[in-house]
Image (tube, rainbow, N blue to C red):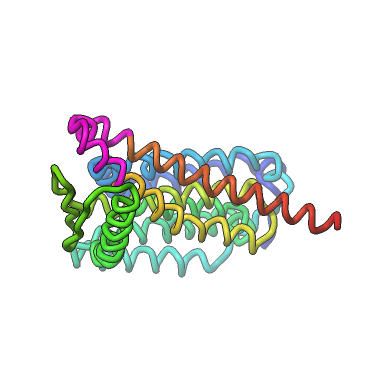
Amino acid sequence: MDVAAPAAAGNNVWGWVVATLTLLLALCYGETIAHTGQVLFKNGDAARAIFPPAIAAYAIWEKRGDWPSRKIAPAAIAIVVLMLGAVIALAGIAGGSLTLVRLAFLISLCGCILAAGGRSALRFLAFPLALLLFTLPVPSPVYYRLTLPLQAIASSGAEIAFRLLGFHAVQSGNAIYLPSQILLISEACSGVQSLLTLTFFCVVYAYWNERRVWARITIVAAALPASILMNIIRITATGLFGEFQRKYTQGVWHEALGYITLVLAFCLIWGAHLLLRYGNRKGIEA
């Protein structure tokens, strides 16, 4: 059955439904949400713990004017979705898989939205919900499948960069032997976390700055080569600093270099997008 928007039909009742569903979600998944945030902060990936929920909330707030014009039609399929979330959560708890429990939270959240507002509400909130996927830590098997090739690419690229700069460099596995130091490319230096963070910002940028689907896909896909290139530059810069001033390769300096290269990677994609739009505009004028 279709009901009018919350402002026009039982605002109090609808508000109580939303409050009740929110409370139930918090009771069922509060510990999981808190643990997920702790894991991301512990792994030095605070950006994915803070920005996705914050930007998702802003995306919802930005569309607040469109909500009164929508119809509330609680969907019966919400029961199926909620049951699916419960089953996956129980399987995750039984198997000790936090990844499954976190996935179950997002499925249950979708089920609550369907129960409170129906398919229209779920479509309305699709983008904010998609952003929350970036808060999920990468499962260990997937993480290591990504880490190894990225480590190899970073090591080979940095060796080539050192040689182009006139340094004698020899790569052996994930180690690069320089005249006065051995540069080890650890798992943390593979660039997996930076790639995920950069992909998130590319998704956000593409959503608000591009309407063409193919251009949005191109912007997001560009995160991979940009991340790899900037990771090679970061490793090369670390090696150069180590050759002349070792203190700049550790602690806050090392972390700052990581943030700087991440910003530069996004600027590279942003600049490429501007050139793409400029070229497209020129093509239309011609």
Residue 276 picture quarter? bottom right
Count of numbered labels shown in the rendering: 0
In the picture shown, does residue 193 fall above or below 173? above
SS majority, magenta: helix
Q: Residue furthest right?
A: 286
Query: Where is residue 224 shown, x and y percent of the image?
Result: 44, 58
Task: Let me know if residue 100 appears in the view.
Answer: no
Quick one: 262 or 239, which is closer to the camera?
Answer: 239
Residue 258 on the magenta segment: no
Q: Residue at x 29, y 60 (%)?
A: 156
- For the N terminus, the quadrant is bottom right
* Residue range (magenta): 236-256
Task: Let me know if residue 257 appears in the view.
Answer: yes
Quick one: 108 or 58, which is closer to the camera?
Answer: 58
Q: Residue at x 55, y 67 (%)?
A: 76
Quick one: 239 or 154, which is closer to the camera?
Answer: 239
Q: Residue at x 31, y 41 (%)?
A: 237
Query: Where is residue 139 shown, x and y percent of the image?
Result: 28, 61
Query: Where is residue 105 shown, x and y percent of the image?
Result: 37, 56
